[in-house]
Image (cartoon, grey):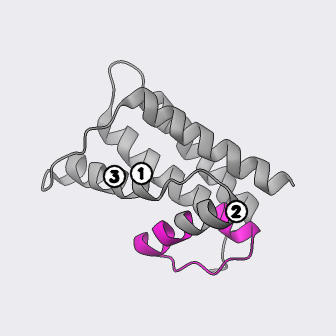
Amino acid sequence: MPEPTAAESLKLAQDHLERALAAATEPVDWTDLSTYGFYCLEAAVMAASGHLKLGVQRSHPGKVGAAKLLANKHKLPDVSALLVELNTARKAHAYGDVEAPDLDEEELASDLDAFVDAVKALIKK
């Protein structure tokens, strides 16, 4: 299967963002918010990386590394730590085998939205 284009990855990120934002409203659905928030960030990282022609290992650690590179070299918001937190939150809510990190739904929704907007602006350049 061919790699998704930057535009396809951005569309996927936006679709996941919609689901994450819907889950962030009262009552907060932490399973959906952590899962779709995580998927949103990963897809947005891949969109930016694809646009910039960065080679990214298609694994969670590879995407965390790409997020750090995007922040350090391309001035995007640094979501590397948030990717790790959301992966932990996703596992906590899906499997219950780890403790969920302390996340604020409003701040999380804002961070997700801001990162997708930054990637969208980067791709439009």
Q: Badges 2 and 3: C-beta atoms under 8 Å apart?
A: no
Residue identified by numbered label 2: 74
Say few, some or many: other residues with alpha carbon within 10 Å of mark 1 (under 14 / 14 to 19 / 20 or more): some
Name the quadrant of the N terminus.
Answer: bottom right
Please, what secondary structure does the residue beneath circle 2 have?
Answer: helix
Residue shown at 87%/55% (left/top)?
125
- Kindly report the distance in space between the C-alpha atoms of the residues bearing marks 3 and 1: 5 Å
Please tell me which residue is depicted at 61% across the width and 64% down the height of the picture: 72
Q: Is residue 101 left or right of residue 39?
A: left
Q: Nearer the viewer, mark 2 or mark 3?
A: 2
Does the magenta segment cover residue 90? no
Extent of the magenta region: 46-67
Residue 44 in the image: state x and y as whole percent.
61, 56
Disc 3: which residue: 85
Q: Say what amino acid the circle numbered 1 marks.
A: Leu
Distance from label 2 to label 1 (Cα)?
Answer: 18 Å
- Which mark is drawn over residue 82? 1
* Mark whose residue sits in front, 2 or 1: 2
Which residue does the image show at 56% across and 36% down from the upper left?
Answer: 18
Residues at circles 3 and 1 in contact by the CB criterion of under 8 Å: yes
